[in-house]
Amino acid sequence: MATRLQVWRPDTCGCVIEQTHDPEADPNPVGLSQVLSRCAAHTLLTDQEVWDAVWSFPVGENRRKNLIRNRIFTLHGVEIVSFTFSGTGGARICTIVTSGLTANQRTAAQSWADTNIGVGKVVIT
Ligand SMILES: [Zn+2]
């Protein structure tokens, strides 16, 4: 059991975060060491607030994007076209742009997001 440090650059914002992890553990627990730099949207948050905003399950920004992307791909075999976040701080809204889904599939994906992540956390277009 040897905790190590790694630098993580989430693809959902410009923050740079140093994580702790234990490569010998299964599952490998990932934790916060420190926030090395903040993006503009997260500039006013503490290290722990940045970690929660980006990584907490299931509402962290990176988790949300991955959950929806995986859900749509698993069910429909379609990659999302893009994702963006609007707002600042810990309550940003994730907008997912899709292509190739029927209206019913898109509505079902939105409903799944509302139930499993939270109403107003993800907007699927
Ligand atoms: Zn950030």
Image: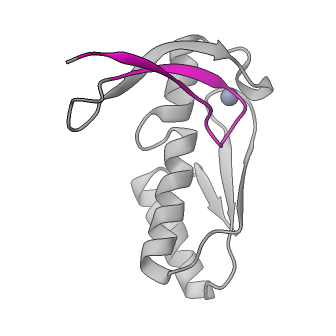
Image label count:
0
* Above-or-below relation of 76 to 40: below
Residue at x-position 67% and y-position 38%: 92
Whether residue 13 is in magenta: the answer is yes
From what the image shows, is residue 125 above or below residue 7? below
Evaluate whether residue 119 shows in this view: no
The quarter holding residue 43 reads top right
Query: Based on the displayed image, in which of its 4 quarters is residue 44 positioned?
Result: top right
The magenta stretch spans which residues?
Answer: 2-21
* Ligand 1 quarter of the rendering: top right
> Relative to residue 102, is residue 58 drawn left or right?
left
Vertical placement of 108 versus 58: above or below?
below
Residue 113 shown left or right of residue 41 in the figure:
left
Q: In the rendered image of this protein, does residue 19 appear above or below residue 112? A: above
Q: Which residue occupies 48% across, 50% down?
A: 118
The quarter in which the C terminus is drawn is: bottom right
